[in-house]
Amino acid sequence: MGELHHFTYGLITPIFAYAMSFLGSLLGLVSTARARAATDTRRRAWLLVLAAWAIGGTGIWVMHFMAMIGFSVSGSPLRYDVPITVASFFIAVITVGLGLFIVGLGKPSIWKVLIGGPITGVSVAFMHYTGMAAMRINGSFDYKSNLYLASYAIAVVAATVALWFTIVVRGIPATIAAAAVMGVAVCGMHYTGMAAMHVNLTTDNLTTVPGVDVNWFLAPIVLFVLVVVIALASAVMAVPSEREQAEAAAVRDKIAAGDALRTATAGPVFGGGSAAGPTNPGTGQAFSARAANGIADARRQRGR
């Protein structure tokens, strides 16, 4: 039996793994918040796709392989099968997207969360073990059943809580706190699954193991994270938030009220109306004053 090392480089890999999970969760929650504010179904759909890319791709898959950089097996080289590794990425993104679309399209409800959460959680844990199945050594891996099942349970709870966050979280402080909790849950699922593993080496002699070293994924991971950050930043800037939409609606309501007042107080078109004078400033001036007040109110609300 070979000895497993989960922290070959010390705490640097779990710290970076948590940072990736936190970043992906934060970007995903921001994107889902903008999706809630979107009134167009098509815009909401592509924002949810970006959220799945952030949470599934960065928050889960990138986190997994950042943590795996610190994993090694004494007595055997460790390599990764590229096609299976790529498949694990698509599993993460697609399954998280499935859960987000179940919850995010249509009217949100607790029943959608309770349906989408377990589906997403089981799929995320399956992604983790697919990534583990991509590993190649001089031997084979086995898993302790109790910790193996515990990792699935953590994944289901984490996914359910994450989907719940996507429909209830409001404001920057709450979003950051929710992303921090999601990062802890995802990392907890990963390291629980890793703790369930033990290895059986077939020989004491080092032989050639097919596949690529985990460091081969570093450049694609960095590029992927940069693309996700830029894409989501662009999406967030392009779509107004719920607060911005509320402020714009308040301004429109003030202007509409001014239009209605001007129409109601305007004189007859052909004679009979009183002329504007010192005691009757005219409806145009009244409307201008009310529109200015409406804009000032909106600015005061934005500055709060």
Image (cartoon, grey):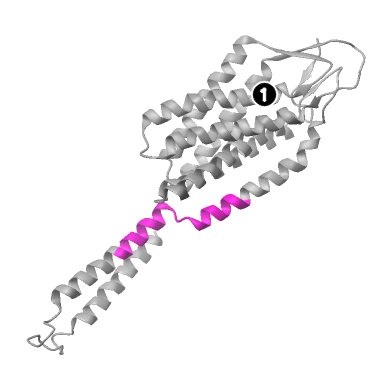
Q: Amino acid at mark 1?
A: Thr
Is residue 290 left or right of 49 when viewed as pictured?
left
Q: What residue is drawn where x is 63% and y is 34%?
A: 90
Count of numbered marks: 1
Q: Quadrant of the N terminus?
A: top right
- Determine which residue is flagged by label 1: 130
Tag 1, which secondary structure? helix
Q: Position of residue 119 (x, y in %)?
A: 50, 25
Q: What residue is drawn where x is 59% and y is 19%?
A: 151
Chief secondary structure of the magenta portion: helix
Q: Position of residue 35 (x, y in %)?
A: 45, 47
The correct choice, above or below, for 259 with respect to 109 in the image is: below
Span highlighted in magenta in the image? 230-252
The correct choice, above or below, for 84 with respect to 51 in the image is: above
Q: 37 or 291: nearer the eye?
A: 37
Q: Quadrant of the C terminus?
A: bottom left
Is residue 112 left or right of 62 when viewed as pictured?
left
Q: What residue is drawn where x is 90% and y is 22%?
A: 208
Q: Position of residue 284 (x, y in %)?
A: 23, 81
Q: State the image quarter where residue 2 is shown.
A: top right
Residue lying at the far left in this picture: please name it: 272
Q: State the image quarter where residue 138 is shown.
A: top right
* The stretch drawn in magenta includes residue 232: yes
Q: 120 or 186: nearer the eye?
A: 120
Q: 199 or 185: nearer the eye?
A: 199
